[in-house]
Amino acid sequence: MPVTLSDVANRARVSPATVSRVLNGNYPVAAATRERVLRAVDELDYVLNGPASSLAAATSDLVGILVNDIADPFFGIMASAAQSEMGGRDGALPGRAGGEKLAVVCNTGGSPARELTYLTLLQRQRAAAVLLTGDAVEDPAHGAAVAAKLARLAETGTRVVLCGRPPLDAHPDAVVAALPFDNRGGARALTAHLLELGHRRIGYVAGPAERITTRHRLEGHRAALAAAGADDARAHRRLTVHGPYDRRSGYEAARELLRRDPDLTAVVAANDTVALGVCAALREAGLRIPEDVSVAGFDDLPFSADAVPALTTVRLPLHEAGARAGRLALGTEEPPEGRVAEVAAELVVRASTGAPRSG
Amino acid sequence: MPVTLSDVANRARVSPATVSRVLNGNYPVAAATRERVLRAVDELDYVLNGPASSLAAATSDLVGILVNDIADPFFGIMASAAQSEMGGRDGALPGRAGGEKLAVVCNTGGSPARELTYLTLLQRQRAAAVLLTGDAVEDPAHGAAVAAKLARLAETGTRVVLCGRPPLDAHPDAVVAALPFDNRGGARALTAHLLELGHRRIGYVAGPAERITTRHRLEGHRAALAAAGADDARAHRRLTVHGPYDRRSGYEAARELLRRDPDLTAVVAANDTVALGVCAALREAGLRIPEDVSVAGFDDLPFSADAVPALTTVRLPLHEAGARAGRLALGTEEPPEGRVAEVAAELVVRASTGAPRSG
DNA sequence: ACGTCCGTAGAAAGCGCTTTCTACGCTCGA
DNA sequence: TCGAGCGTAGAAAGCGCTTTCTACGGACGT
């Protein structure tokens, strides 16, 4: 019932081999023959059988993009940028001539187990490339498992790229390239900005405790405090609250921080979304931003500029990084020296931070 | 080099057929044998060859979710809900026993051509199901092309589900189920709310002109106006501006509307994101919300409740709809009567709308 | 005790492609 | 004029799995 290569071959009065070659465009075929084949393809409305093709060729045009939360624009922006590097020009080719890839995003929900599941599924499909984005869990066992999995993928020809995620401990060379974000530097600049304004009691709403990004941003924060001679471990612990990367977490954390220290003058949030929750809680407590309390986020997502007040944050060039990661995954761009290229983070000062009251 | 089914079979001292049966779990295998096979799988770290498996079985466990804009939470929420219905329990199975699907999201960027490309790619992969989400372009040619493509997919066993998109004109039975949103009703309720408050000069920032959702929301809007005897075609045209679904579009449209009618007392936006842009422009023009101008959005995305002021909008149960669509795609849930089930939209009144000044 | 079934496992035929390897003209250079 | 060499196309051997169809025992009924 379904149209096969041979059907096309028969109609074009050539051998299946020739049809295959026309479709894949990697072997000289006389123009007239090609024409004939293409017409037959068209007339029969033939669509290549992907599994058969992948089986015979031992590769596929599937590219997996793993994200922690597809509903979070942080990932959406990277994924979309990466994907647009791959989709190729508009228009559906019948063969896989154009280097077209089926770029496909997989939502792990931040679960290590699901991450592994997806990697296995992609391995099963003989994916051409895998792109892991964003934060990683800092669990040695899981880290090792992921690294091992990626190593096996690499062995069988899958190109592995890391975007916004630090290089692997275990099999660093399984990866084509890693583009980690400078979370430490960004966080440090952000807190330094607050310190300069005169803030000393700075609450910190950190991300999930076991995540590597959380740790890096926290380290940057503390580094800034230390540089200002303000890094008191006890106070630090008291003014740090952990939670997931969502609005609600920010809301609750802010209430908690207010409870612990009603006199804090600034709150730094794990990211912009969390910062919005923080703002909501502060406002509800009758505090003005930034007159009573300054608030800062991280990532500089599109909505941050529109928030009221506009959010001071740290810009991560998500689009650029995603696009580059996409090219790296495709092999369109040369990997950086040493396979690692840190992505710079840039402080963006807006209206949500100002000098403290008693400042 | 790579481990194959036969390797596992050899090691377990059974035939390849038996290994396959253990992995697929659809044929009785004695417990002891199964055990032996599973151990061999484990020891060899075997991963099924997806293409080979799909080729032989003539189906795959790939499920495609098409979205217009992956960086927009509107789609992210639906996709994530759908995907979580499919991923199955955590943990990677070596076979495809658990009915695990590789749910995968494809970003069309709203381009009809890319939509078709992805459908072809999924057809090529013999996808088990395809889920189209969100708005569709209202171009007869493209609509027909998509419908034809979906019909072919359906013929070869792919389950097609529409979520937030109206049923097909052309091959309505190619689709397992369609879950269109009640955009008309929602828009109508929203505008009715504004009219009740006393507004008469209501600006409308519509979505892209050629999209079906745009038309439906606009129709609801006009229906409400008509019901209040306020549907003047000339005024309507003057107070309606089209633009893409993004923040910037709202910003610019609001400035344009203000230029056209400095005395308008309310603005309805295509969706919440656009509404935020509208708010920014109004604020910049020195207008207070809602004292000077009321603003309303659509969709009720998570950030809308946190906006300042909190956004009056129309809630679409994106998560529920996405999850249901996911189940429908999997065949876990019975399709609704007539294959179409409209998803209700609910007016959510918050702080961004109030009585007009002169009201 | 013999024939029947049921439960379980193996043999083998593909699934629809890709890709060597081979073969067929031609055109050229000598 | 003949052989080398190039450009082009076909034959056929798989790729690694699924799935009939067949076969083998042992339990069971009579």
Image: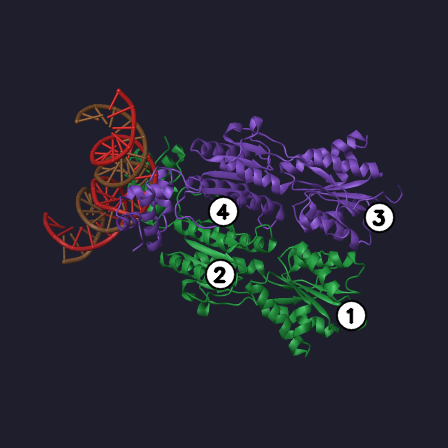
Chain colours: A green, B purple, C brown, D red
Is residue A161 found left or right of B9 in the rendered image? right
Q: Nearer the viewer, mark 3 or mark 4?
A: 4
Q: Residue B292's mark?
A: 3
The type of residue carrying mark 1 is Pro
Residue on which the image places disc 4: B89
Q: Quadrant of the C terminus of chain A?
A: bottom right
The type of residue carrying mark 3 is Asp
Residue shown at the point (67%, 73%) measured from the top left: A234
Q: Nearer the viewer, mark 1 or mark 4?
A: 4
- Residue A43 image point, x, y percent: 39, 33
Chain name for mark 3: B
- Residue A60 image point, x, y percent: 39, 49
Is residue C3 found left or right of A25 in the rendered image? left
| Tag 3 secondary structure | loop
First in residue order: circle 1 vs circle 2: 2
What's the CA distance linking mark 3 and mark 4? 52 Å
